[in-house]
């Protein structure tokens, strides 16, 4: 059975399940890449990735912020480490104290997702958009990682400064981020865990 093609960037989705191999390949190839080469992400690819994120289902307002400014990324990275070390959480304190640890993994591109407090579904909407971007980036040959740790940077005294540098209004709160780039040694990578968390109700 054949279906009508819908092209989203270079991700081709066909209406019937037998033809969705491109999407399934991207899903199966997805892993958390925690080390990147210095190669910049092509501008056309960035547009394709962002456009895919904008096409995700939405529940209320949210903001996508695309950052390639290395100085700003380094600043967010440093304040993330600061926030993790002061979090009081043993796991985050230990991770932030690991020699060479870089919460943004030196990615050349990090996309931040923010939403206002009044949007109670902001986190859900941001995550759906992030997943669209992740799968599109993978289809274009990039590595990705879904990031929650940068939230620690916005819990430090540098919050207002970082919000201003991200060109966000003060009522928006960063929720998550996605790092994108060519995969490096991935020295902080971990094997994907098989989780038995599915039940069927018939």
Image (cartoon, rainbow, N blue to C red):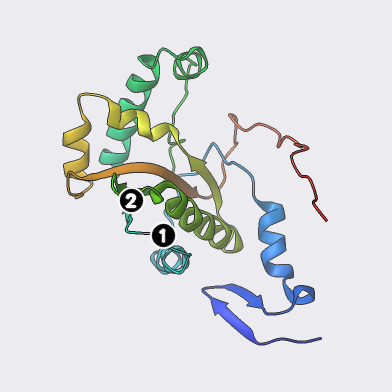
Residue 43, image x and y in percent? 38, 65
Please state, as top left, top right, bottom left or bottom right, where the N terminus lies in the image. Answer: bottom right
> Residue at the location (23% across, 46% down)?
166
Where residue 111 sits: x, y (%)? 39, 50
Establish if 39 lies above or below 98. below
How many circles with numbers are drawn on the protein? 2
Q: Is residue 94 above or below residue 111?
A: above
Quarter holding the C terminus?
Answer: bottom right
Residue in view at x 66 percent, y 59 percent? 26
34 sits left or right of 18 in the view: left
Q: Secondary structure at mark 1?
A: loop
The residue to which callout 2 is attached is 119
Lower position in the chain sequence, tag 2 or tag 1: 1
* Spatial separation of the CA atoms under disc 2 and disc 1: 8 Å
Q: What is the crowding at mark 1: few (fewer than 14 residues within 10 Å), some, or many (at least 20)?
A: some
Residue labelled with disc 1: 59
Q: From the viewer's side, name the closer residue of 49 and 88.
A: 88
Q: Is residue 117 above or below residue 25?
A: above
Is residue 96 at all visible to an observer of this figure? yes
The residue tagged with tag 2: helix, strand or loop?
loop
Q: Are marks 2 and 1 in contact (CB under 8 Å)?
A: yes
Residue at the spot x=32%, y=49% of the render?
115
């Amino acid at each position: 059975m054949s279906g009508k093609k819908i092209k989203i960037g270079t991700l081709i989705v066909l209406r019937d399940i037998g033809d969705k191999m491109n999407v399934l390949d991207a899903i199966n190839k997805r892993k958390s890449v925690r080390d990147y080469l210095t190669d910049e992400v092509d501008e056309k690819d960035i547009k394709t990735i962002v456009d895919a994120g904008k096409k995700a289902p939405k529940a209320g307002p949210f903001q996508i912020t695309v950052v390639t400014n290395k100085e700003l990324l380094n600043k967010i990275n440093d304040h993330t480490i600061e926030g993790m070390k002061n979090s009081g959480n043993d796991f985050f304190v230990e991770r932030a104290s690991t020699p060479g640890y870089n919460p943004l993994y030196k990615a050349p591109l990090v996309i931040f997702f923010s939403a206002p407090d009044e949007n109670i579904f902001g986190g859900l909407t941001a995550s759906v958009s992030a997943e669209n971007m992740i799968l599109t980036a993978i289809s274009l040959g990039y590595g990705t990682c879904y990031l929650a740790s940068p939230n620690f940077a916005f819990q430090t005294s540098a919050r207002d400064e970082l919000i201003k540098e991200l060109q966000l209004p003060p009522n928006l709160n960063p929720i998550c981020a996605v790092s994108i780039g060519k995969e490096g040694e991935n020295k902080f990578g971990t094997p994907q865990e098989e989780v038995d968390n599915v039940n069927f109700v018939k």
